Image (spheres, rainbow, N blue to C red):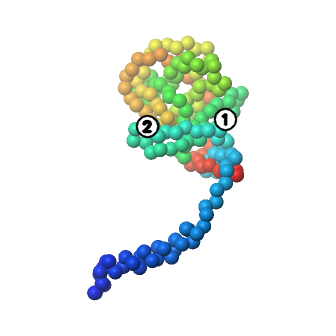
Amino acid sequence: MRWQGSSEFALLPLTALASLLFSAPVFGQRPTLKPVQQVTVVDSNGKIVGHSFGGVGLHFLVGAHPSFEPTVLLQVAQRVVAVNVTKDRFYAGQVLFELENCQGARWFPPNDRTSESLLPYVVVGPPGNTIYLPQINALPQRMTFGSVLSFGNECSSFPFSAPGIPGDALINLDTVFTPPFSVRTIP
């Protein structure tokens, strides 16, 4: 809508003046800066998932937006495991499947350094956010796999042959926590 006898350029000085007047208090204030001692991940009900002790950056994925996902430690039965948390899910490691579309039995890629680790190597996969551990004392077997799940939600289907170790389900985290997840800080 145009006013008679005016142009779009007549509104520019008024718009600039209004933006200066309304933003002046912001420019005059210094932002508050506090160190953060601890970051806690909580679910949508306020239930504590865990305290972050680090995180994983996913900026290296092609087409992914830069992100930094907290890593939390969880104790399930007598085992302490590390998993990463996004707003809507958990993830850890890479899991191999016997069938396409991330279906069938779950297998782990062998890891030569597993015996040196303080924490067990785990993966998170379907159904839901289930934590899987490699079977204790299982030896790698050469298998033909149909798909691989990376970062807890990226299923790639293609046939390939590789060594694998069968996995056992530990717990489905969906039975304990409710997304979306968020962080709380303690200054």
Near mark 1 (Cα within 10 A), the count class, few <14, some 14-19 or many ≥20, is some
What x and y, as percent, mark residue 95? 50, 27
State left or right for residue 34 relative to residue 103: right
User: Which residue is at a point 52% across and 71% down the rendered structure image?
Assistant: 23
State left or right for residue 20 relative to residue 25: left
Quarter where residue 73 is shown = top right
Q: Is residue 58 above or below residue 4?
A: above
Q: Is residue 166 visible?
A: no
Q: Secondary structure at mark 1?
A: strand
Residue flagged by tag 2: what amino acid is it? Leu
Question: Which residue corresponds to mark 1?
Answer: 74
What x and y, as percent, mark residue 137? 61, 14
Q: Is residue 14 above or below residue 124?
A: below
Q: Quadrant of the N terminus?
A: bottom left
User: Which residue is at a point 45% across and 37% down the rendered structure image?
Assistant: 60
User: Which residue is at a point 69% across and 33% down the rendered structure image?
Assistant: 75
Q: Nearer the viewer, mark 2 or mark 1?
A: 2
Image mark for residue 54: none
Of the pair 28 and 186, the residue shown nearer to us: 28
Chain-order first, disc 2 or disc 1:
2
User: Which residue is at a point 34% across and 80% down the rendered structure image?
Assistant: 10
Of the pair 42 and 130, the residue shown nearer to us: 42
Residue flagged by tag 1: what amino acid is it? Leu
What x and y, as percent, mark residue 150? 47, 32
Of the pair 9 and 100, the residue shown nearer to us: 9
Question: Which residue corresponds to mark 2?
Answer: 61
Quarter where residue 85 is shown = top right
